[in-house]
Image (cartoon, rainbow, N blue to C red):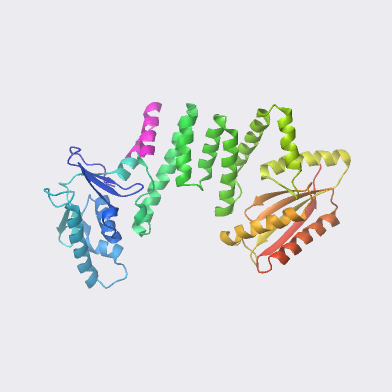
């Protein structure tokens, strides 16, 4: 891809495409707000991003008039380029035409130097990977690139197929860069800056679990355990609802670290007792995150081994008729409805946690095999009564807790 051209800042067209579209030369600026014709801007940006060559007329027609008769698109393309030149006159009132016509092709005029933020961003990313550079130099390159990335490429043109591939390319570059930059900031214990960088990245790509891990870690290292827990809960909910996947082991390990910190913070016994009484006063099953469920499991296993009591574990799975995971929008609604039924059907001593996007795991202390099966049948029956138009399948498995 064409890198930055040379020339004085006054004479160089600054093309900002990350997070929006803005063309600036000297004191003059042009944005999409002044002309909302998407095809016009698409052709202009395509020529800008391929200004190292002449673009054949047939290439532009294939891109922007793919299913139309070739005679009309040719005329339409000429009209569009005429309108584009007219729009650019506000930026180049006395200069040469920025778009040249050739034999069956169009090109950006090489006498009109241009700098594109997306290309500069990529150049900084590539340089930041150079291990021969000093560590501080690489960190500074990361900082500059992160600041330059103001959002995904050409968001108002995001439905254009040629934009999708390029936007994905730059977005991937950005996510990789943030992870490298965050690692450098963590090594330097620059945790507030690490938080700021990762928080912005999580807004742009909330479903990248590694970014969520880095953000939570930056909060923990600053002693912000409550904020870390809140972010953890939001991240796990996002993963369940949008991808239908369980949090990774790295994310679950952070949960245990958060819990260890939280337990070590409160030293006032009256406050602790008040919190415990408030939690104990809630009716229905105890709903918790799976990392906490694992701790309860270990505790109950020890108690059962010592007292000789019986505890059963149940796994409740939602699936499509005939098998398979349901579409996420249908699955999420069903899982919310199912949790309401589960908590209302169980006792206060029972524990429930989401195990995967389509599963809940339940712990039933003091329940025999027959009791556990009866409870699960009651949950299924209650769900079918309240949501009889829901056609998804519910199935469960029950087994005794392993106390060995």
Residue occupying the point 72% across, 32% down: 272
Residue 289 visible from this viewpoint: yes
Residue 96 lies, with reference to residue 213, above or below; the image says below
Residue 224 lies, with reference to residue 397, above or below; the image says above
Q: Is 401 placed left or right of 196 in the picture?
A: right
Query: How many labels, in total?
Result: 0
Residue 134 visible from this viewpoint: no
Residue occupying the point 80% across, 41% down: 301
User: Which image quadrant is residue 225 in?
Assistant: top right
Residue occupying the point 40% across, 51% down: 168
**Residue 337's spot in the image, x, y percent?**
66, 58
Q: Is 194 placed left or right of 14 in the picture?
A: right
Toward the viewer: 394 or 281? 281
Residue occupying the point 83% across, 39% down: 303
**Residue 102's spot in the image, x, y percent?**
15, 59
Range drawn in magenta? 123-147
Whether the magenta-drawn stretch holds residue 294 is answered as no
Q: Residue furthest right?
A: 308
User: Which image quadrant is residue 271 in?
Assistant: top right
**Residue 54's spot in the image, x, y percent?**
20, 55
Toward the viewer: 313 or 390? 390
**Residue 224's spot in the image, x, y percent?**
57, 32
Residue 4 lies, with reference to residue 51, above or below; the image says above
* Placement of the C terminus among the 4 image quadrants: top right
Q: Is 328 placed left or right of 22 in the picture?
A: right
């Amino acid at each position: 891809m064409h890198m930055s051209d040379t020339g004085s800042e006054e004479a160089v067209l600054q093309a900002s495409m990350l997070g929006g579209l803005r063309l600036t030369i000297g004191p003059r600026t042009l944005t999409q707000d002044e002309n909302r014709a998407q095809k016009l801007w698409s052709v202009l940006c395509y020529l800008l991003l391929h200004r190292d060559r002449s673009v054949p007329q047939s290439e532009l027609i294939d891109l922007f008039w793919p299913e139309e008769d070739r005679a009309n698109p040719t005329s339409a393309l000429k009209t569009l380029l005429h309108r584009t030149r007219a729009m650019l006159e506000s930026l180049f009132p006395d200069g040469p035409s920025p778009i040249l016509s050739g034999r069956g092709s169009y090109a950006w005029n090489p006498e009109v130097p241009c700098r594109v933020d997306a290309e500069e961003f990529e150049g900084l990313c590539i340089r930041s990977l150079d291990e021969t550079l000093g560590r501080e130099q690489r960190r500074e390159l990361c900082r500059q690139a992160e600041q330059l990335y103001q959002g995904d490429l050409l968001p108002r043109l995001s439905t254009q197929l040629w934009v999708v591939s390029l936007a994905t390319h730059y977005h991937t570059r950005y996510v990789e860069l943030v992870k490298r930059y965050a690692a450098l900031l963590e090594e330097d214990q620059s945790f507030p800056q690490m938080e700021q960088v990762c928080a912005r990245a999580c807004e742009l790509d909330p479903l990248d679990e590694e970014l969520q891990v880095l953000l939570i870690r930056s909060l923990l290292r600053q002693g912000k355990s409550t904020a870390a827990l809140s972010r953890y809960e939001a991240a796990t909910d996002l993963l369940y609802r949008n991808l239908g996947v369980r949090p990774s082991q790295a994310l679950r390990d952070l949960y245990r670290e958060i819990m260890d910190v939280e337990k070590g913070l409160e030293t006032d016994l009256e406050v602790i007792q008040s919190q415990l009484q408030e939690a104990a006063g809630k009716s229905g099953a105890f709903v918790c995150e799976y990392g906490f469920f694992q701790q309860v499991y270990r505790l109950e296993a020890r108690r059962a081994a010592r007292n000789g009591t019986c505890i059963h574990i149940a796994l409740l799975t939602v699936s499509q008729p005939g098998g398979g995971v349901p579409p996420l929008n249908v699955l999420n609604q069903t899982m919310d409805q199912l949790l309401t039924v589960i908590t209302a059907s169980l006792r206060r001593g029972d524990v429930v946690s989401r195990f995967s996007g389509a599963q809940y795991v339940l712990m039933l202390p003091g329940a025999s095999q027959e009791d556990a099966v009866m409870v699960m049948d009651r949950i299924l029956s209650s769900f079918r009564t309240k949501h009889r138009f829901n056609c998804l399948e519910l199935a469960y498995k029950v087994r005794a807790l392993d106390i060995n």
